[in-house]
Structure formats: C-alpha cells, structure tokens
Image (cartoon, grey):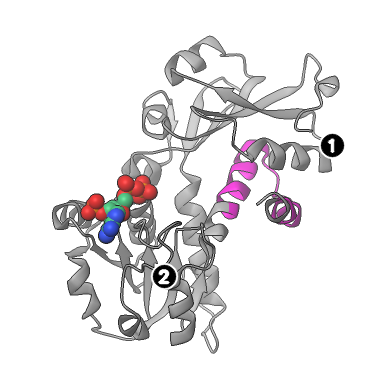
C-alpha cells in the first residue's frame, strides 16, 4: 500500500513526482516510508502532469506540492518555470528536484549529477592506498565521459565543476565537441579513446546506452583499454553488472554501479525536501526489495 490517506490532514505537506507516464515510479514508496520513519506530517504521491508550468501556477499553496521530483518528459521544461536554479543544473539544462520555499518561490536542483559524482568521489576515496585528500578527490583527475546525451552532460559538468580534466568521447563526434567545449574539456571519438592513455589512474564514466538490457553482451570500450583506469562508473543499471563493469573489475579497477547513482540522487532529493539527512539504510532496503 503506497499511500495512507487517513493520515492526510489540512496541514499535511504534499510532495510528489511529476511525469508522464509516472505510475511506475517507486519514489512514493521510498519517500512515504522515509517520512513515516521520522514521523513527518507529509505524503508523497504520483502527479500525472501534462503541463508543468500550469501545474505550478495552479497549485501554488506552499503546503501543496511543497517539493517535487521531476521525471520524463519534464526535466528540461521544468527548469524554465523556476524562480531559482542550481548553477550546475542550469548548465546541464535539466532539473529533477524542485522545492517550494516558505515564501512560495520555486528552486530546482539536478540531483542526478550529484548522485553520480558523490558515488565516484567516495569510490576514489576508498581505493587501496589512496592518500586521504582534503576536498574532492576528482581535482586534477583525467575524467573520461563516454556519451554526450543527457546523462553525459550531467557527468561532464559535474566532474568539471569538481576540478577534473574532462574528456568527452561520443559516437557522434560533433556532439562530443559541443559538450567538451562547454565544459572546457577535450573531445574524442570512441575509437580514439581506446588508445588514449597519457597517464595511469584515470576515471571512466559510461553514459551511453551500450550494454543496456537486452544488449548485455555489448560494451562501449574494449577490455584492453580499461587497464589505465583506476575507477569505472556505468550509468546503466539494467543490468546492474554490465559487461563494462565486469571487465573493469577483472582489470583491477574500482567500480561504481549505476544503482548507486540512482539511490544517491534520492538521498539528495530527501535532504532538499526536508532539510534532514536521508534514512539511507531504509532507502537501500526498499530499493532492493522492490527492484
Ligand atoms: P541519455 O539522456 O540517457 O544520456 P541520450 O540523450 O539518448 O540518452 O544519449 C544516448 C547516448 O548514447 C549518446 O551519447 C549516444 O551517442 P550519439 O550521440 O552518437 O547518438 C550514445 N549511444 C547510443 N547508442 C549507441 C551505440 N550503439 N554506440 C555508441 N554510442 C551509442
């Protein structure tokens, strides 16, 4: 059972996910359990929405739609309806987390990039023999992003903001070039990146759909090219163990799963909604149970 409507009172804060389609989203399950675990007078529902702008102007009470997650196909349009947007989210051009402040103003974030980047940072911090660093372990790292679509942008802007040296490699070179220019990085073709190893200890982030179900035998970069990377991240989470990640593991690199980005972006949303730390174990348990 997703919602317990008996708990809704006049002063209950209503949160939700806006999208179309939206019924499949597991977010209500996670957030309602999380609210309940700390006794918050709040619910989180599915909002099937056609017109995002109209939605926010129609429901402008601070207690209704106090916070929203935003999914397909509204992530880009929603950005334009906001009073304030996180600077990196603005550059990425997409938001997935909207908070209504007490004064009624709408502020939006992109927690997808934060989820991916923090997972990668923690992966680097956990490397054997890694010297503890003050600040981000991505500072000065060569960070190779495969793909230049929505997820590619998130990773490239996120890594650049942390001080990494970014390389964008994409099947369609022009798209790689456009993104690389915007983040102050360098563009390559996928073929070029196979033979690119100016130094050891590079970070690789796959954001292409190569290797996603049902094409699980595919990989965006051959195994021999992985030996120069200390950490490999795959944004794909179906399957969890992609061919890329399996081969990276065999090569001795640390790996970061796409599911980790997914769950961490949820932690960030919860923090922005409530100002409280996310009940991380509860989120993880529910995600596993309902995967
Ligand atoms: P998302 O928003 O999830 O990033 P997207 O915008 O459709 O999705 O981007 C998909 C990415 O996967 C693109 O970088 C795409 O490369 P192109 O720009 O050349 O289209 C990449 N991609 C998809 N199928 C691919 C394939 N078979 N080989 C290599 N790259 C592929």
Q: Which mark is residue 138?
A: 2
Which residue: 71% across, 24% down? 13
The residue indicated by pointer 1 is 39
- Secondary structure type for disc 1: loop
The prevailing secondary structure element of the residues shown in magenta is: helix
The residue most toward the left is 174
Let me know if residue 275 is in the magenta part.
Answer: yes
Q: Position of residue 3 (x, y in %)?
A: 76, 28
Q: Position of residue 126 (x, y in %)?
A: 57, 78
Q: Residues within 10 Å of mark 2 (few under 14, many from 20)?
A: many
Q: Earlier in the sequence, mark 2 or mark 1?
A: 1
Which quarter of the picture shows residue 142? bottom left
Which residue: 81% across, 17% down? 9
**Is residue 59 in view?**
yes
Asked whether 238 or 26 is in front, the reply is 238
Which residue: 50% across, 46% down? 111
Classify the position of the N terminus by image quarter: top right
Q: What segment is highlighted magenta in the picture?
A: 263-286
Q: Is residue 207 above or below residue 90?
A: below
Q: Position of residue 200 (x, y in %)?
A: 33, 86
**Is residue 150 in view?**
no
Which residue: 73% across, 28% down? 43
- Decide if residue 257 is on the left or right side of residue 227: right
Q: Residues within 10 Å of mark 1 (few under 14, many from 20)?
A: few
Q: Is residue 236 above or below residue 219?
A: above
Let me know if residue 213 is in the magenta part.
Answer: no
Which quarter of the picture shows residue 122? bottom right
């Amino acid at each position: 059972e997703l919602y317990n409507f008996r708990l809704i009172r006049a002063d209950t804060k209503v949160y939700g996910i806006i999208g179309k389609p939206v019924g499949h989203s597991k977010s209500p399950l996670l957030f309602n359990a999380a609210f309940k675990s700390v006794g918050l007078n709040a619910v989180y529902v599915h909002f099937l929405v056609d017109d995002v702008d109209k939605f926010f102007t129609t429901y402008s009470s601070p207690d209704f739609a106090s916070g929203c997650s935003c999914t397909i196909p509204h992530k880009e349009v929603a950005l334009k309806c906001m009073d304030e947007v996180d600077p990196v989210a603005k550059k990425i051009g997409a938001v997935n987390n909207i908070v209504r402040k007490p004064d009624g103003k709408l502020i939006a974030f992109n927690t997808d990039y934060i989820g991916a980047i923090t997972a990668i940072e923690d992966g680097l911090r956990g490397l054997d023999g890694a010297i503890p660093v003050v600040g981000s372990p991505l500072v000065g790292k060569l960070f190779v992003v495969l793909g230049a679509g929505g997820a590619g942008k998130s990773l490239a802007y996120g890594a650049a903001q942390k001080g990494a040296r970014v390389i964008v490699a994409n099947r369609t070179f022009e798209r790689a070039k456009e993104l690389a220019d915007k983040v102050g990085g360098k563009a390559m073709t996928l073929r070029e990146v196979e033979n690119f190893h100016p130094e050891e200890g590079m970070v690789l982030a796959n954001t292409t759909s190569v290797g996603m179900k049902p094409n699980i035998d595919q990989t965006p970069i051959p195994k021999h090219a992985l030996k120069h990377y200390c950490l490999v991240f795959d944004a794909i989470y179906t399957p969890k163990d992609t061919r890329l990640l399996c081969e990276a593991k065999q090569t001795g690199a640390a790996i970061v799963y796409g599911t980790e980005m997914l769950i961490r972006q949820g932690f960030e949303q919860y923090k922005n909604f409530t100002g409280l730390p996310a009940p991380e174990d509860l989120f993880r348990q529910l995600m596993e149970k309902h995967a």
